[in-house]
Amino acid sequence: MKIRLFIKPYCGWCHKAQRWLDERGLKYETLDVIADHAALDEMVKLSGQSLAPVIEVAGKILADFGPDELAVFWEKNFPKADRRD
């Protein structure tokens, strides 16, 4: 399962999202939307806004969230997902 996390380097919510994923042993790709303008354009296209973090998991999008929203999103969409994929 492919996980992509769009972040801004100095974003506290982005760091919390990374920590949440790390604590669960989930592998993900990090895209820095400040350093990579193509990543910013893609994030805006996927989410409809420029706030970070934005996560894309298997085609499902969650935008501008904190750890609690990420937990709900994950449980709703991937309750049985193998965390090591």
Image (cartoon, rainbow, N blue to C red):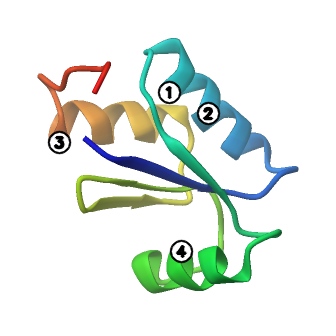
- What kind of element bears circle 1? helix
Left or right: where 4 falls relative to 83 = right
Left or right: where 31 falls relative to 74 = right
Q: Is residue 22 above or below residue 48?
A: above
Q: Which residue is mark 4?
A: 43
**Res 10 label:** none
Left or right: where 44 falls relative to 8 = left
Disc on the earlier residue, 3 or 2: 2
Q: Nearer the viewer, residue 42 or 79?
A: 42
Residue 52 in percent (x, y) is at 65, 61
Residue for point 45% across, 30% down: 27
Q: The disc labelled 2 sits on which kind of residue?
A: Gln
**Res 77 label:** 3
Q: Which residue is mark 1?
A: 21
Residues at discs 1 and 2 in contact (Cβ within 8 Å)? yes
Residue 5 in percent (x, y) is at 53, 51
Residue 85 in percent (x, y) is at 28, 27
Q: Which residue is mark 2?
A: 18
